[in-house]
Amino acid sequence: MEIIGELLLQLILEVLLQVLGELLAEVGLRSFAEPFVKREERNPILAGIGYCLLGLIFGGLSLLIFPDAIVRSERFHGINLLITPVLAGLAMSAFGHLLKRQGKTLIRLDSFIYGFLFAFMMALVRFVFTS
């Protein structure tokens, strides 16, 4: 009887794990696709998650090209986690204003917060995996 209870518990935990994994995959895939949906139709939270995922991916890809830390000083190694994303967010915001003045269609990345999120996640990957 104890074996049946253990087997049943294992089966229930497996199903819960699978369902949880599928739900996380669903949210992840929707978040990844959200930045590419028309701006007016987007969920801003999912778009933010999508830009975070893209930042992680681009951070990983950047390691293939630049495997070493760009700022090599031990004292300033972590500065990239704050200054670079803020500057990138400001640059994307300025770029968005320029595009808006020209009557071009904007994407969410053309704003400070989404530019910051993307750059922060990219910098975080580089911070963790470079010395």
Image (spheres, rainbow, N blue to C red):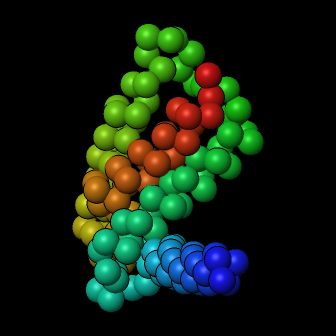
57 relative position to 83: left or right: right
* Residue 39 in view in this figure: yes
* Residue 113 location, quadrant: bottom left
Instruction: List x then y, in percent, for residue 69.
Output: 60, 25
107 relative position to 128: left or right: left
Classify 44 as above or below 69. below
Classify 76 as above or below 56. above
Count of numbered badges drawn on the protein: 0
Residue drawn at x 38%, y 72% is 47
Farthest residue, direction front = 1
* Residue 33 in view in this figure: no
* Residue 84 location, quadrant: top left
Instruction: List x then y, in percent, for residue 4.
Output: 67, 84
Q: Nearer the viewer, residue 19 or 9?
A: 9
Classify 61 as above or below 6. above
19 relative position to 108: left or right: right
Q: Nearer the viewer, residue 91 or 20?
A: 20
Residue drawn at x 55%, y 42% is 125
107 relative position to 67: left or right: left
Quadrant including the N terminus? bottom right
Residue drawn at x 62%, y 22% is 131
Classify 74 as above or below 59. above
Instruction: List x then y, in percent, for residue 20.
Output: 51, 77
Instruction: List x then y, in percent, for residue 70.
Output: 58, 25
Q: Nearer the viewer, residue 73 or 106?
A: 73
Residue drawn at x 47%, y 78% is 27
Farthest residue, direction bottom = 41
